[in-house]
């Protein structure tokens, strides 16, 4: 089994790690666009063009499914990706978990990029699934960029700004950018009020990984050491996991994977970071 994931950057690590936990035997293809990120400030047409290029690089590895582990690409490029790749390759988008968050009652905050906060896309999701719950959109300028390069000081600064914009009575937070799931516990740490009930965070990684398996008729496998391969593509180039990925538990889990064979004509896959050290 081979599953591909795409994103502008390292935000795909959370969904990839979730897939690795569900199916340790699956070969994973991680395709991202560090040369073109961030995608958020780009026009919808530009996002679509970049997303198609990243998806084509992943599709060359002939995966059984492609996870669009990026909220921005899911908003703007999902129809184009599905038009090009389906039905040969099922395409699974990422949607902020507003519905399950609202089902638990409010108040709820949605942490997202400034481009997504207040967008028609997010407002539509709130209208459809908010069910009258008090929901606040919280823009998080700079957080995704800081997570991308694992800049600890910049992450702390961005978290402080976003926390200051979050109502103090919020008990549920939707992580509306896949990058944010990599620092979920740090988000919890800056928002949890002393003596208050435990904060609930809603990400999308586990749900989207499970949905990908359902789309191809596969079941989760028993827990085991990772045996599946790993291929990494950075802006169309075969590569290894970026060093910044190893700052996160999800990246270190994936680094324990083997390497996959690149498709004929696409160049050889380079060992993931950490693989060379084991040799």
Image (spheres, rainbow, N blue to C red):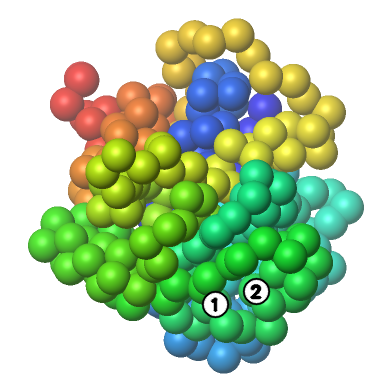
Q: Nearer the viewer, residue 63 or 253?
A: 253
**To which quarter of the image does residue 162 belong?**
bottom left
- Quarter of the picture containing the N terminus is top right
Q: Nearer the viewer, residue 264 or 37?
A: 37
Total marks shown come to 2
SS assignment at label 2: helix
**To which quarter of the image does residue 211 belong?**
top right
Relative horizontal placement of residue 178, taking residue 182 as reference (left or right): right
Q: Position of residue 199 (x, y in %)?
A: 42, 43
Q: Which residue is drawn at 71% across and 48% down?
A: 103
Asked if one can make out residue 85 in the rendered structure from this viewpoint, the answer is yes
Q: Position of residue 92 (x, y in %)?
A: 72, 51
Q: Residue at x 32, y 53 (%)?
A: 191
* Residue to which mark 1 is pinned: 116
Q: Which label number is shown at residue 122?
A: 2
Q: Nearer the viewer, residue 16 or 167?
A: 167
Asked if one can make out residue 264 in the rendered structure from this viewpoint, the answer is no
Contact? badges 1 and 2 (CB < 8 Å): yes
Relative horizontal placement of residue 265, taking residue 144 as reference (left or right): right
Q: Badge 2: few (under 14), some or many (20 or more) residues near its Cα, within 10 Å?
A: many
Relative horizontal placement of residue 74, taking residue 188 as reference (left or right): right
Q: Which label number is shown at residue 102?
A: none
SS assignment at label 1: loop
Relative horizontal placement of residue 190, taking residue 119 as reference (left or right): left
Q: Position of residue 232 (x, y in %)?
A: 43, 47
Residue 141's place in the image compared with 258, above or below, is below
Farthest residue, direction left: 153
Q: Residue at x 40, y 25 (%)?
A: 258
């Amino acid at each position: 089994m081979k599953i591909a994931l795409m994103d502008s950057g390292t935000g795909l690590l959370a969904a990839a790690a979730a897939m690795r936990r569900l199916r340790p035997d699956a070969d994973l293809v991680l395709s991202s666009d560090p040369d073109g990120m961030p995608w958020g400030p780009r026009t919808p047409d530009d996002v679509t063009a970049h997303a198609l290029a990243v998806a084509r690089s992943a599709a060359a590895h002939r995966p059984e499914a492609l996870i669009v582990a990026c909220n921005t690409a899911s908003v703007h490029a999902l129809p184009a990706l599905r038009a090009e790749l389906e039905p040969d390759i099922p395409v699974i988008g990422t949607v902020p978990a507003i519905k399950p968050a609202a089902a638990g009652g409010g108040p709820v905050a949605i942490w997202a990029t400034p481009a997504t906060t207040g967008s028609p896309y997010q407002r539509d999701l709130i209208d459809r699934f908010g069910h009258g719950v008090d929901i606040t959109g919280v823009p998080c300028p700079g957080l995704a960029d800081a997570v991308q390069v694992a800049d600890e000081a910049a992450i702390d600064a961005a978290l402080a700004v976003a926390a200051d914009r979050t109502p103090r009575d919020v008990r549920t937070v939707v992580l509306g950018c896949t990058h944010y799931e990599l620092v979920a516990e740090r988000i919890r740490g800056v928002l949890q009020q002393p003596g208050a009930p435990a904060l609930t965070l809603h990400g999308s990684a586990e749900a989207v990984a499970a949905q990908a398996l359902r789309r191809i008729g596969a079941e989760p496998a028993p827990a085991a050491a990772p045996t599946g391969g790993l291929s990494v593509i950075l802006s169309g180039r075969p590569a290894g996991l970026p060093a910044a990925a190893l700052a996160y538990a999800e990246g270190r889990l994936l680094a324990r994977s083997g390497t996959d064979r690149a498709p004929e004509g696409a160049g050889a896959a380079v060992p993931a970071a950490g693989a060379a050290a084991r040799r």
